[in-house]
Amino acid sequence: MKVSDFLKEDVSPLLLGAFYSRYIFSNDNLKIYTEVSYKISKFADDYNLLINSKNILLEKLNKISYPFSFWQDVTKTTSNTPQMILKFELDNDINLTRDSFYNRLNVKILSQDFIYEEKLNEYKKMFIRGFAESRGSIDTTRPLIAMDYFYNSLIEVKRARILYDYFNVPFSVLNFNPRELQNDYVTGRRKRNTQLRFNLYWYVKHIGLLNEYKVSIITNVYNNIKYSHKDGEVKYFTSPDIAHSKKDSFDFMLRYYANNIFNKKLSDFEIENLRNELNFNTSSDINSFKRDLSLIELIRLNTPDECSSCKTTKTYTHKNTGRQYFEYHHVISIGKNHELDDENNIVKLCPTCHRIVKKGSAPETEQKTVIRNILHNRPNVFEFAKHIYDLENFEEIVNKIWQNLK
Ligand SMILES: [Zn+2]
């Protein structure tokens, strides 16, 4: 299939999900492909089952992808641990680069009507299967389905956001484990890829499984996951309920990673500090992800210790942290508007400046000076305010913010 057709035609959400999750360019850039792959597991140590499952899966993938039934079996059986590989290949007839392919795919996904429906519909589920099951492996020690997470650019680092922005995946069932912070990576024992993981209990109940081999591993390993029913090509399961956290630590990790780790040359010392700040050293990494990380902590770690208005770096030393003390201020006061609880709406202020911008605590001119300073010193906050008020004019925005002070 030509990539130009792929981008134009009405293709199965499964294909969109599979390519969005991972696309690979051939060395000569003439082909772009994605893969479904898995290996034999000691928890379902049956070679016939493995081969059979692959044949059934190939049939299912081609049925789901109809009329573009171009999945091919490129399994390598020569090695000791045979790897089942099913491949879907596109001809790069319009000479796309990696970035342009990714961008066009992204636009295509965002132009699908089904993603704007409120419920987790069958199309969304198919996308998630392409995204997750195509490459995810079942963790046999903790209830997770885990996949290597690849990216070429900062935009791609954040691609998993689409899952909770549009695909009804609760962020509390997602977990992001950047390679730079993995214990094995830090100690140099083994460098593994960054991983994205879904909670398995949630996954098998709501998304279900296509691959019979994975079904077999799950039922052999997890006795609290039970087969429930089949719907089309998919098997669903019953599983323990999980508590959904309201705090978005997954998104925090993505943003934190994008801002502080991705493409940075970090010394061992700096990595160790990051690990400490994120509590990676005090517990197993899976537990630390469950730690509630607030937006305030993000600001605390990500912005310099200086007042966003008067720019002083000296207040007084905080007795617990040993750092200078700053207060956190929502530039646009938040009422019930959740949208305003954003990293671009919170700044550090010294206690003096903070007192000034409390409603009625100083003359209008003084309060507006602080607001102007903040917008000058923090361009991201100014951009955010423009967006929220849908205004361009600096003084109009200052006035709006002043009127809304709380
Ligand atoms: Zn100040």
Image (tube, grey):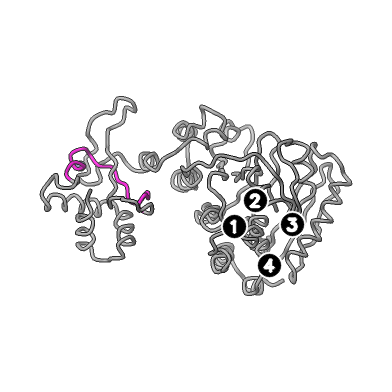
Single out the mark in the foreground, 1 or 4. Answer: 1
Q: Tell me, yes or no, if residue 24 can be seen here.
A: no
Position in image of residue 231 (x %, y %)? 74, 57
For marks 2 and 1 on the same chain, the one whose residue lies earlier in the sequence = 1
Residue wearing tag 4:
30
Disc 1 and disc 4: Cα gap in Å? Answer: 36 Å
Type of amino acid under label 1: Leu
Q: Earlier in the sequence, mark 3 or mark 2?
A: 2
**Amino acid residing under circle 2:** His
Are the residues at dot 3 and dot 4 in contact (C-beta closer than 8 Å)?
Answer: no
**Secondary-structure class at tag 2:** helix
User: Would residue 75 appear left or right of 102 to someone viewing this image?
Assistant: right
Q: Quadrant of ligand 1?
A: top left
Secondary structure type for disc 1: loop
> Is 378 included in the stretch rendered in magenta?
no
Q: CA distance from mark 2 to mark 1?
A: 9 Å
Range of residues picked out in magenta = 340-356
